[in-house]
């Protein structure tokens, strides 16, 4: 017995869970890294590091929306 709709929903559930887990882990790692770098050299690297972190965060939100649905 094989139903393409069932396979699709199983794949959707797996992909959604995987994306959410990967997204959460990635954001946590980036946030911690950026926090420590900004804390050590806030005036020198604060604005430089804040932009890539924000860009990565937006990128993974878009990635999760596109591939999670």
Image (cartoon, grey):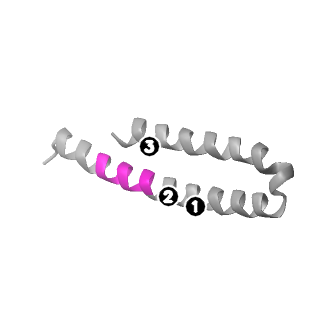
Count the marks: 3
Question: Residue placed farthest to the front in the image?
Answer: 43
- Between 14 and 55, the residue placed more toward the observer is 55
What span is in magenta?
12-20
- Between 47 and 14, the residue placed more toward the observer is 47
Q: Is residue 5 left or right of residue 12?
A: left
Question: Is residue 58 shown above or below 20?
Answer: above
Q: Which mark is residue 64?
A: 3
Q: What secondary structure characterizes most of the magenta part?
A: helix
Q: Position of residue 6 (x, y in %)?
A: 18, 46
Name the residue that disc number 1 marks.
Answer: 28
The residue located at (48%, 42%) in the rendering is 61
Q: Position of residue 53 (x, y in %)?
A: 66, 47
Whole-angstrom CA distance, mark 2 to mark 3, is 10 Å
Q: Is residue 17 left or right of residue 39?
A: left
Tell us which disc is closer to us: 3 or 1: 1
Q: Secondary structure at mark 2?
A: helix
């Amino acid at each position: 017995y094989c139903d393409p709709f069932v396979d699709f929903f199983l794949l959707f559930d797996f992909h959604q869970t995987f994306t959410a887990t990967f997204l959460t882990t990635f954001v946590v790692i980036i946030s911690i890294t950026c926090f420590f770098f900004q804390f050590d050299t806030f005036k020198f690297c604060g604005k430089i590091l804040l932009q890539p972190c924000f860009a990565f965060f937006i990128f993974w939100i878009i990635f999760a929306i596109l591939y999670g649905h």
